[in-house]
Amino acid sequence: MKHTLAVLTENKPGVLTHISGLISRRDFNIESITAGYTEESDMTRITIVVDADDEYELEQVVNQLSKLIDVIKIIDLTGQDRVHRELAMIKVKALPANRAEIVNLVEIFRAHIVDVSKETMIIELTGEEDKIEAICELLNDYGIIEIVRTGKIAICRGPKAAKDV
Amino acid sequence: MKKMTGAQAIIECLKKENVDVVFGYPGGAVLTLYDELYLSDFPHVLPRHEQGAVHAADGYARSTGKVGVCIATSGPGATNLITGIATAYMDSIPLVLITGQVALSLLGRDSFQEADIRGITTPITKHNFLIKDVKDIPKAMKAAFYIARSGRPGPVLIDVPKNIFAEELAFEYPECIQIRGYKPIVEGDKAVIDAVCNELQSAKKPLFFIGGGVNLSDTSALMRDLVAYTGVPTVSSLMGLGSISSNDPHFFGMIGMHGSYAGNMATTETDLLVGIGARFDDRVTGKLEEFAPKAKVIHFDIDPAEINKNVRSYIRVIADLKWSLAELANKIKERPSEAWQKQFMPWHHQLVAWQKEHPLAYSRQTNRILPQAAIEKISELTQGNAIVVTDVGQNQMWTAQFYSFKNPRSLLTSGGLGTMGYGLPSALGAQVGNKHKKVVCICGDGGFMMNCQELMTIADLNLPVKIIILNNQSLGMVAQWQRAFYSGHYAHSNMATKADFVAISTAMGVPAIRLEHKDELDTVLREVMNSEGPCLVDIRIPEEEDVLPMVPAGSGLHKMIMGDWQ
């Protein structure tokens, strides 16, 4: 089962490497990992989507990560009421004949066209994984040249910050 | 606030942490620090290889309970520490390692003697630092010692660029340190202790399984008290040896691959296995599915990540053993000792019967000196009171089986990593930390060769370490496995050149003697053990002697290969 972990760490060089290194060394299965600054400049938030076989494996992932001195807190967001998003940019072949169709698609998905050239477009889309998968599948028909995705980030609904949970 | 250089600050920090000796090896990047060691006359031990330095610091730490400190230069100096750091990490030994680094202006340019030691040691240290500003030295040193010795202990590395040693700072040592992401657990949950007590009360065949954590947390006295009061049969891992006396009537030896028959059978039959400061290593458990199959497992550990890592536990007690064993003793003492003893008497009798049926023993029908007999003799001559340091392999297992340990922290051995070459330098460090105790180093010929250069250090300091080589002129444990599992193909386990260890030792300044005849065993060892100063004994033992009993890797503990005489 997939679990989304919010990992709050010291904002120091090498922390992400340390975390990803630990995860690969212990042979845990990572789906995605993203990192960025937070509202506190000395804290980084790393969102990890991990595929755990069972509760014991998940417990090990959390406990092993917690051992790292630079890890301040780990919150399992799975099962909590949360919003999660991923950002994707997709460069797709867009010959004049197809353009109108692609623009329609983009509108339906509430995506944006952020660049147009004679033969291509770049489409920017934020959404849940499924939504991004869906647009990619449709755009495939026109010829996708390149996809770049961020991996998932997630935040809980309600008044509290994850660090205060 | 006093102005001083980075190098002076480091020495000041060592003094503040009550460090009484450092083990290290100089080189370009740490020359400024070495100059300050010279000027301040700080006690320093110079081994002949950085690996020797870190194992020595490790032996010092294991035997004294203090933090071992080690210094090395950048690049190759630092990378030579790796095996020792990994050894300490696997066995949770508190070390602080100070490595030199190339100057900040040269960092990241593949400069002369540059290695990314932080990156390299990340998986094998509890934490590490790269100092980029001289002002950070006091805080980093304070944090390093605090992290190394608190919670589950471990090695911490501080990498200091060359220029930082020379730069100036206003020195102030922090009184205490707060680290957001590091809150070592001390006290646990009292309700859980009650639950443990209830389980013990309803158990018929409980078993205490002691790990290295009892030695490391200095809770041997609490453990002995608990065992004596309840009469619960007790076994240990290799790392747990010494925390309870080998002669305790409730102690049934080591379990696992080379564990005792009684211990392994008890583990298979127990209905309540209480693991105390043990991490259920595969050398202990054998095949996990067949490990303690009838038991509920209770796990005491300071590190939450050890819970359910290998063996699923029914009750977890996450706390410092100082807290949890004391709490458990309080709870248990609400019921009289006699009641507990009576409850477990039939089970105790069962273990005694197993022990009588298959004792740890060896064939005495030979004219050669058997390694087991040599260990027994050393045990007798030192009355179980020596600090015994082993290397890795057969010598290590024979020591574990046949030396009668009386005291905690009296067996120093590379348990987790199984580092050949550990013995000699670690013994050196142990002797430095325990000037008035007898330190005996038991090696095989293979492991001895791996760091034999440290004989020179021992000679330099005239450390009275007694070095025993159980010399079968081969890599004994490798050969044993080849006999048992590889059709007797001795693939490169024979030492083709039969080195003259007596000559090597004498050449490096340590008196040595060869022991080949059975009838000389007592007199020679007696003389050596009573001698002042260092001495090496090269004992020639039969090449085909096995460590038995043995559980083949990946088997259940009850599937033991026994010797004919066992």
Image (cartoon, coloured by chain):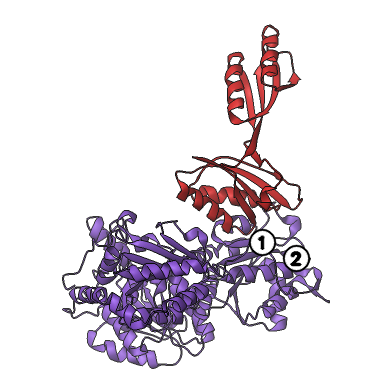
- Tell me which chain the residue with mark 2 is part of: B
Left or right, A51 with respect to A139, comes to: left
Instruction: Please tell me the numbered disc located at residue B53.
Output: none
Chain in red in the render: A
* Quadrant occupied by the C terminus of chain B: bottom left
* Quadrant occupied by the N terminus of chain B: bottom right
- Give B202 or B432, whichever is nearer the viewer: B202
- The answer to the question of whether label 1 and label 2 lie on touching residues, with beta carbons closer than 8 A, is yes
Q: Quadrant of residue B79?
A: bottom right
Circle count: 2
Q: Is mark 1 on a helix, strand or loop?
A: strand
Left or right, B166 with respect to B493, comes to: right
Q: Name the residue under label 1.
A: B129
Establish whether labels 1 and 2 are both on one chain: yes
Q: Where is residue B464 in the image (x, y as percent from the top left)?
A: 46, 87
Chain in purple in the render: B
- Give B184 or B486, whichever is nearer the viewer: B184
What's the residue at 46%, 69% (across, down)?
B193
Q: Earlier in the sequence, mark 1 or mark 2?
A: 1
What's the residue at 33%, 91% (across, down)?
B526
Q: In which quarter of the image is residue B485?
A: bottom left
Instruction: Tell me the crowding category of disc 2: few under 14, some 14 to 19, or many 20 or more residues within 10 angstroms, Cα based.
Output: some
Q: Mark 2 points at which residue?
A: B136
Does B99 sit above or below residue B501?
above
Instruction: Tell me the crowding category of disc 1: few under 14, some 14 to 19, or many 20 or more residues within 10 angstroms, Cα based.
Output: some
Left or right, B473 with respect to B188, comes to: left
The answer to whether residue B92 is visible is no
**Outermost residue toward the top?**
A97
Left or right, B52 with respect to B350, comes to: right
Does A82 sit above or below residue B326?
above
